[in-house]
Amino acid sequence: MIDVAHPLPVTRQTRLLGLARSSAYYRPAPGSERDLALMAAIDEIHTELPFYGARRIRGELLGRGFVVGRGHVATLMRRMGITAIAPKRRTSKPAPGHKIYPYLLRGLEISEAGHVWSTDITYLPLARGFCYLTAVMDWASRRVLSWRLSNTLDAGFCIEALEEALARYDAPQIFNTDQGSQFTSEGFTSVLTGHGVQISMDGRGRWLDNVYIERLWRSVKHEEVYLKAYENLTEARRELTAYFDFYNHRRRHQGLSDRTPDEVYWSTLRRQATAA
């Protein structure tokens, strides 16, 4: 997202995107082999038992033979960007000064593709490191419209995924996110408002508000990531490209009456166009 060769100074680019200037120069230090193994195990436990916090995840790790303290587990979870999915006083931490938008989906019937999109970020283990995956999903059809990988948790790769989805498809009426700093940043929200999209953000303690994309992460990890153990980002991009093609075109969903996301997406878009 940041182009150091661009005539516009890096400082100005980061300001326009709502990013900290330091993020343009930051290069993550590789983690220790032990921490990488712990993080991979934490990710598996969190994917299987998303309601577990640091204390209970530590118990699972002890059962797997890891000797680790609760504090270190909590530190690694923060580094991974994950938290227990359960009702609590505060489910995410927006950056200070970022605007928080109200939740717009309560009681709303969402049966047509293109009505509501949503997004989220998840952690992916690699053989010698880790990365983060974000995706933009159509709510009604579960279709993945775009996705990006990054080795940092800045907003840039989220903005790239959003811009790609908006370039390829008509803008939705509503876009739903959590209150994470990537999605409350000016760079992200300005793209949505510039396309006339209403912004909706999950309320505190409402972990089910973005449940469909949470289910996507579970499918991606169990059906793809954990089976292949990617060596690096290049391999991850190549294999995930094939997986998301399968997911959209061939993978049938019980929640979609055994239809694929593509079938639901294009059929409901046609009905919407006809009704208009």
Image (cartoon, grey):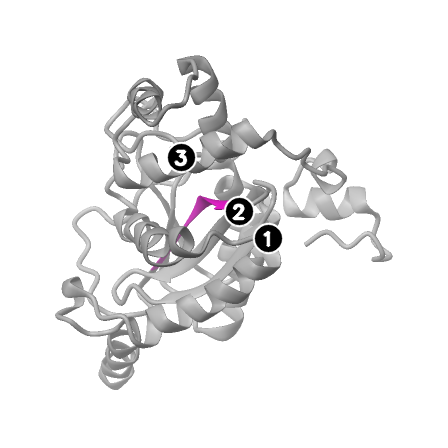
How busy is the neighbourhood of tag 1: few (under 14 within 10 Å), some, or many (20 plus)? some
Q: Nearer the viewer, residue 161 or 257?
A: 257
**Quick one: quadrant of the N terminus?**
bottom right
Q: Nearer the viewer, residue 233 or 50?
A: 233
The type of residue carrying mark 1 is Asn
Q: Which residue position holds label 2?
A: 126
Label 1 sits on a secondary structure element that is loop
**Marks 2 and 1: CB-CB under 8 Å?**
yes
Q: Is residue 152 above or below residue 71?
A: below
Rounded to the nearest angstrom, the CA distance separating label 3 from label 1 is: 18 Å
The type of residue carrying mark 2 is Leu
Q: Which residue position holds label 1?
A: 232
Rounded to the nearest angstrom, the CA distance separating label 2 from label 1 is: 6 Å
Asked if the magenta segment contains residue 123, the reply would be yes
Magenta residues (range): 117-125
Work out whether mark 3 precedes mark 1 in sequence or the reverse, and give the earlier one: 3
**Whole-percent x and y of residue 27?**
72, 38
Q: Is residue 190 above or below residue 239?
A: above
**Marks 3 and 1: CB-CB under 8 Å?**
no
How busy is the neighbourhood of tag 3: few (under 14 within 10 Å), some, or many (20 plus)? some
The type of residue carrying mark 3 is Ala
| Residue 18 position by quadrant | top right
Q: Is residue 194 visible?
A: no
Residue at figure coordinates x 77%, y 55% from the top left: 3
107 left or right of 49 in image: left
**Quick one: quadrant of the C terminus?**
bottom left
Rounded to the nearest angstrom, the CA distance separating label 3 from label 2 is: 12 Å
Q: Which residue position holds label 3?
A: 41
Residue at figure coordinates x 73%, y 42% from the top left: 24
